[in-house]
């Protein structure tokens, strides 16, 4: 994999992982070019083989034959970027701190987002808000029909199944107390 600046990625402003990676690129002063939109649609339009699964953000690197390769999953991508762009490191050199850093990152990635997605997709007013904002973040020139179609798709498709927070939870509210309790619990140290 050839990693060279400017780093190209496709993402959405409402995606926490996109925000995480843009923050990292900015912190490390790595030049980047972000394509705001749906990675799926961009890859189709440009005949680029899709990673499995396609996620926000999707990075576009080159392989050894200079072919564009779409790559996802922020944690290993951060480690790849660190090996190429060493200044302003985000990975502690001390092995104990490095482990804690990895643990916190993994907790944030795998669990912090569960609360966020739960609150985003649980109540009708939140579904309506996120269902409207997310497609418009990706493309602010959508027609009303296109926006309605995307909103319908968002509120009926269990998009978040890989993240353990599905739209069907609306019908089975069993996880809600756990999300609320844990959300308050992790917020406590910051109050
Ligand atoms: N482990 C991945 C997770 C990325 C992820 O789940 N992104 C969400 C949006 S924030 C996503 O693309 N979900 C599926 C979808 O939108 O279709 C990472 O760290 O990059």
Image: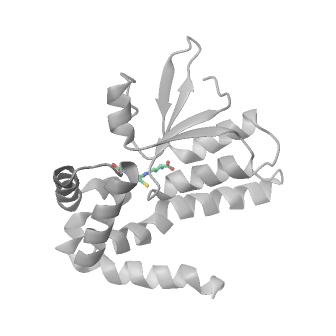
Residue located 40% across and 83% down the image: 180
Q: Position of residue 27 (x, y in %)?
A: 72, 52
Answer with left or right where residue 7 lies relative to residue 14.
right
Q: Quadrant of the N terminus?
A: top right
Would residue 19 be visible to someone looking at this image?
Answer: yes
Answer with left or right where residue 86 lies relative to residue 139.
right
75 shown above or below 84: below
54 shown above or below 70: below
Q: Position of residue 152 (x, y in %)?
A: 17, 58
In-front residue for pair 69/149 = 149
Residue located 32% across and 49% down the image: 141
Residue located 20% across and 62% down the image: 155
In-front residue for pair 57/166 = 57
Residue located 38% across and 67% down the image: 117
In-front residue for pair 11/2 = 11
Q: Quadrant of the C terminus?
A: bottom right
Residue at the extreme top of the image, as rendered: 65
Residue 147 occupies quadrant: bottom left
Would residue 53 be visible to someone looking at this image?
Answer: no
């Amino acid at each position: 994999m050839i990693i060279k600046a400017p780093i190209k990625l496709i993402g959405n402003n409402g995606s926490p992982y996109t925000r995480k990676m843009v923050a990292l690129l900015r912190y490390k002063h790595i030049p980047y070019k972000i394509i705001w939109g749906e990675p799926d649609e961009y890859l189709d339009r440009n005949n680029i083989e899709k990673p499995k699964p396609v996620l926000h953000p999707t990075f576009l690197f080159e392989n050894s034959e200079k072919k564009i390769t779409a790559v996802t999953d922020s944690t290993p991508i951060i480690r790849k970027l660190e090996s190429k762009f060493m200044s302003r490191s985000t990975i502690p050199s001390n092995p104990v701190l490095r482990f804690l850093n990895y643990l916190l990152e993994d907790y944030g990635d795998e669990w912090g987002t569960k609360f966020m997605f739960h609150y985003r997709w649980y109540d009708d007013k939140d579904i309506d808000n996120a269902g409207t904002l997310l497609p418009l973040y990706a493309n602010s020139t959508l027609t009303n029909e296109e926006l309605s179609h995307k909103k319908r798709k968002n509120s009926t498709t269990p998009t978040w199944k890989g993240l353990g927070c599905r739209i069907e939870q609306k019908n089975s509210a069993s996880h809600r107390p756990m999300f609320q309790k844990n959300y308050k619990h992790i917020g406590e140290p910051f109050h």
